[in-house]
Image: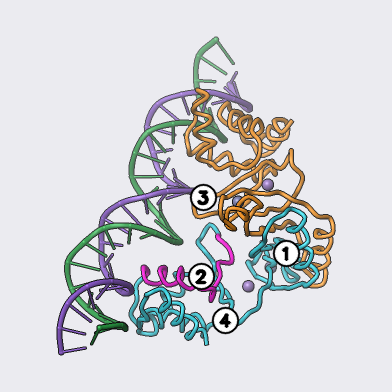
Chain colours: A cyan, B orange, C purple, D green
Amino acid sequence: MGKRIFSKFLKERGKRVTKEREAILQKILSSRGHFDPESLYLKIKEMGLKTSRASVYRTLNLLCECGLIERVKKTEHGTIYEHTSVHEHHDHMLCMECGNIIEFYSETLEKLQEGMCKRQGFQGVSHTLEIRGYCKKCQKKKRT
Amino acid sequence: MGKRIFSKFLKERGKRVTKEREAILQKILSSRGHFDPESLYLKIKEMGLKTSRASVYRTLNLLCECGLIERVKKTEHGTIYEHTSVHEHHDHMLCMECGNIIEFYSETLEKLQEGMCKRQGFQGVSHTLEIRGYCKKCQKKKRT
DNA sequence: TTGAAATTGAGAATCAGTCTCAACAAAATT
DNA sequence: AATTTTGTTGAGACTGATTCTCAATTTCAA
Ligand SMILES: [Mn+2]
Ligand SMILES: [Mn+2]
Ligand SMILES: [Zn+2]
Ligand SMILES: [Zn+2]
């Protein structure tokens, strides 16, 4: 499904639909959750498909532009992405102990943000909310 | 005021209060708003004080640990910091056109987040909310 | 099928941030 | 006060993510 969107996007810009770009998108769509460019690159090589880091990075930028994926977060170890076509918009809780990511969504929270924007005369387009702390498991561990 | 806190923090850890560390903290406290390591480094040099990039980075890490400053955001051009002792906690709206940053705070929003954490059994410690979009000025420019 | 135009991949370049280590300074011991 | 111990500094090397370069290759409209 994302394949169509991507092809259309590329053609509209006079860009080309190549095997490499298709392989990269396919691999992203066929795996769940968050990912980073380096692991994606390695997974694609493992499958015997040919690609290069340069192409992975270039394609990730294109996929961001066309809205099929999103940059979730820049960390000290690089950028984390996720695909948006599957998931609807959501925010994240990040466990500082184990790195586990909990996804959540609250309509009320979203509305409230819109309200804040209006009050400031700001035209909101997108947002990221990250709550850092400790997940259930890690809270238990700490108690002992 | 932050000077005291920093000295205490350093001593508690068997670390030393040096001219370089004091100069860096002073420069941060005496300037308003957000900053990045490189400009901070340049400002300090301009003043004729002696320092190195290494020391700036090292000291910023210490100041984060002791809570006097915070990493606001990692961008493609590096990390943006701000000092917390002055400002209370707040969130950000970031204009994608001109880079302008609007700070805001909503009690309701904070409470709502606490509620979301409780529902997930997550122990929230801190968070970052960034809303991206267009500020008043840039909205006007776009219309014309 | 052909050729102009876009894309690819290997490796060089860039850039923020960290690390190394010898010279130096602060605290602790004598 | 002199000496020893230990932490800090700064220049520059290093790292790792990402982008750039450019010759070779591929796409696709005609
Ligand atoms: Mn997610
Ligand atoms: Mn701020
Ligand atoms: Zn955890
Ligand atoms: Zn603006």
- Kindly identify which numbered label has been placed on residue A32: 4
User: In the picture shown, does residue B44 fall above or below A71?
Assistant: above
Residue B32, disc: none
> Is A3 a magenta residue?
no
State left or right for residue A123 relative to residue A70: right
Q: Which mark is residue B78?
A: 3
**Amino acid type of the residue that numbered disc 3 sits on in the rendered structure:** Gly
Chain ID for label 1?
A
Q: Are marks 1 and 2 on the same chain?
A: yes
Picture layout, residue C15 above or below residue A51: above
- Tag 4 and tag 3 share a subunit: no
Mark 1: secondary structure: strand
**Labels in figure, total:** 4
Chain letter of the residue beneath label 2 in the structure image:
A
Q: Is residue B45 above or below residue A123?
A: above
Q: Which mark is residue A64?
A: 2
Tell me the distance, in whole angstroms, between the alpha carbons under discs 1 and 3.
27 Å
Between disc 2 and disc 4, the foreground one is: 2
Callouts 2 and 4 on one subunit: yes
Q: Point out the frontmost of discs 4 and 1.
A: 4
The boundaries of the magenta stretch are A53-74
Q: Is residue B25 left or right of residue A63?
A: right
Task: Give the residue displayed 58% in from the left and 80% down from the top.
Answer: A85
What amino acid is at disc 1?
Tyr
Q: Which percent across, then down, holds residue D21?
A: 26, 58
Q: Crowdedness of circle 4 by 10 Å Cα count: few (<14), some, many (20+)?
A: few
Do badges 2 and 3 share one subunit? no
Residue A55 lies in what quarter of the image?
Answer: bottom left
- Residue A134: image tag: 1
Q: CA distance from mark 2 to mark 3?
A: 20 Å
